[in-house]
Image: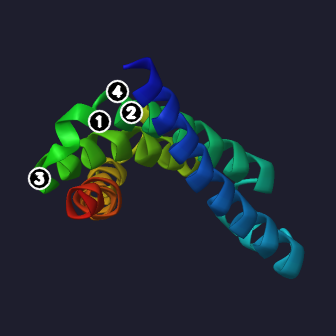
Amino acid sequence: MKSDIRWGIRVGLSFAALFSAWVLVLYTTQGPGAFERLGVTVWGAVLTYLTGGVVAGAIVGALRPLAKTRVGAMAVGVLAALPVAAAACYLLYGAPLHWKRSVVIACGIYAVFIGLVCGSWFWSRFVARKVREN
């Protein structure tokens, strides 16, 4: 179990590094304007990605045994995407107590959509591939 969690955190940090690199490229090429319009800082975005990557990765790792089927992987994906979506909404809108209903709904829809897509990709990449190789 611990090795699965460590594996998940490594995968989560890999995704966080990619997204953080993208944010830094945007900041370098376009300046702080896009971030200022959203009311965030570039370092706030990077920290959000890193935190989300660690938390989502730990969830994926802990629930990795449930991801043996595509449906299971998609369910794990949704559970892992919830804290990432919540962190992004926190960055953009502040504390959850101040969120409008539309923000909560959008956060949930984002988590479900991204979780289903990423869970399906995860299953194709890490589970089905091993089955085909054996």
In the picture of the structure, the residue carrying the numbered disc 1 is 64
Task: Where is residue 48? Give x, y as percent.
Answer: 62, 44
Asked if the residue under mark 4 is in contact with the one under mark 2, i.e. CB atoms within 8 Å, the reply is yes
Q: Residue at x 46, y 44 (%)?
A: 84
Q: Identify which residue is drawn at 79% across, 49% down.
A: 43
User: How far apart, in angstroms, are the residues tagged by discs 3 and 4?
Assistant: 17 Å
Image mark for residue 71 = 3
Find out whether the residues at labels 1 and 3 contact each other: C-beta distance under 8 Å.
Answer: no
Q: What amino acid type is highlighted by mark number 4?
A: Ala
**Disc 1, SS:** helix
Q: Which residue is mark 4?
A: 62
**Circle 4 — which element?**
helix
Q: Classify the position of the C terminus by image quarter.
A: bottom left
Mark 2 residue crowding within 10 angstroms, few (<14) / some (14–19) / many (20+): many
Q: Position of residue 112 (x, y in %)?
A: 24, 55
Please identify the quadrant where the N terminus is shown.
Answer: top left
Callout 2–callout 1 Cβ contact below 8 Å: yes
Q: CA distance from mark 1 to mark 3?
A: 12 Å
